[in-house]
Image (cartoon, grey):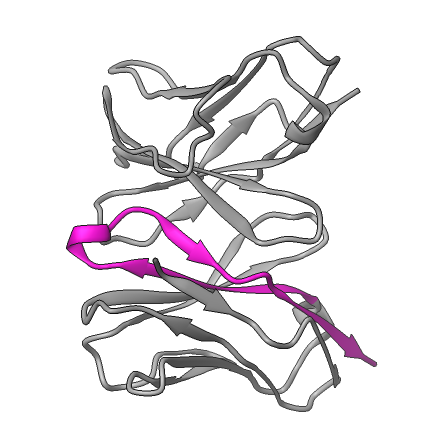
């Protein structure tokens, strides 16, 4: 079974600085998808970024980028120029390829605090 | 284009009652997924449905829980004879295809007294 591990329960960053959230996963599949979701105090799950495993290029979305290391099964999220609105719980998620498509497996989350 | 809708947003039930949670997917989406989030934990997959079919229910408790996604109308997650341990946030997500991104609704917070 696939597992997702987020080893940092809590992280903090100064406003305008950069922070990296870690995520590792375990799978025997070669085709899969990885996601980072943000959950603010409202508890709405908001998609931050998506990475297809077959793509070598790291995904980026404005201030958010990932470092995807397929061989190491690592998928970290970098937030640049942190803003107060970035404060939230961040979840890393894995979704399998065709044979196991559908369900996503989530890590336990990292709570990010942004200090003014 | 409205997002994924869930209702009610908050639901209070006494032990032994039934809870019915509804999810309307985004327009054009025919794939629905239910997840449960216990306090201080990540989301745990429960069930994956397409119209009129259950595709994967490997995360669904064997008793008291059921889900459907009829041809017309929203998807329903039904919990019979609720117990205190059922208290959680239940999230629904939808996608346009199996490999497509899942978009989440705002969740239903179930509290069992």
Q: Is residue A98 left or right of residue B30?
A: left
Q: Main secondary structure of the magenta part?
A: strand
Residue under the point 51% across and 70% down: A5
Residue B26 at least partly seen? no
- On-image quarter of the C terminus of chain A: bottom right
In the rendered image, residue A114, in percent from the top left (x then y), is placed at 76, 77
- The image position of residue B27, as x and y in percent, is 32, 34
Q: Nearer the viewer, residue A72 or A112?
A: A72
Residue drawn at (57%, 39%), measured in percent from left and top? B106
> Quadrant location of residue B15?
top right
Query: Residue A65 at what x, y percent from top left?
Result: 45, 82
Q: Is residue A68 magenta?
A: no
**On screen, residue A26 above or below B13:** below
Q: Quadrant of the N terminus of chain A?
A: bottom left
Identify the residue shown where x is 29% and y is 13%: B72
- Name the residue: 42% across, 55% down: A105
What residue span does the magenta drawing correspond to?
A88-116
Specify whether A39 is left or right of B75.
Answer: right
Relative height, residue A103 to residue B4 (above, below): below
Residue A79 horizontal/vertical position (percent): 57, 82
Left of B20 or right of it: where is B110? right
Toward the top, the furthest residue is B17
Determine the image quadrant of residue B7.
top right
Residue B17 visible (yes or no): yes
User: Quick check: is A103 in the magenta stretch?
Assistant: yes
């Amino acid at each position: 079974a696939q597992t997702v591990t987020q080893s940092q329960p809590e992280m903090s960053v100064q406003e305008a600085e950069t922070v990296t959230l870690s995520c590792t996963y375990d799978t025997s599949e070669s085709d899969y998808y990885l996601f980072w979701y943000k959950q603010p105090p409202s508890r709405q799950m908001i998609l931050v970024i998506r990475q297809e495993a077959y793509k070598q290029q790291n995904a980026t979305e404005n201030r958010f980028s990932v470092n995807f290391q397929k061989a190491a099964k690592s998928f970290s999220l970098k937030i640049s120029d942190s803003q107060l609105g970035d404060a939230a719980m961040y979840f890393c998620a894995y979704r399998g390829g065709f044979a196991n498509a559908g369900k996503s497996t989530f890590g336990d989350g990292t709570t990010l605090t942004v200090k003014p | 284009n409205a997002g994924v809708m869930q209702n009610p947003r908050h639901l209070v039930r006494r032990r032994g009652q039934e809870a019915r949670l509804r999810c309307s997917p985004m327009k054009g989406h025919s794939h629905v997924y239910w997840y449960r989030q216990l306090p201080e934990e990540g989301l745990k997959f429960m069930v994956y449905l397409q119209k009129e079919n259950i595709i994967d229910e490997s995360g669904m408790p064997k008793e008291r829980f059921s889900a459907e996604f009829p041809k017309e109308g929203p998807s329903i997650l039904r919990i019979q004879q609720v117990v205190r341990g059922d208290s959680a946030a239940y999230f629904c997500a939808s996608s346009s295809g199996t490999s497509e991104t899942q978009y989440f609704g705002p969740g239903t917070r179930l509290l069992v007294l």
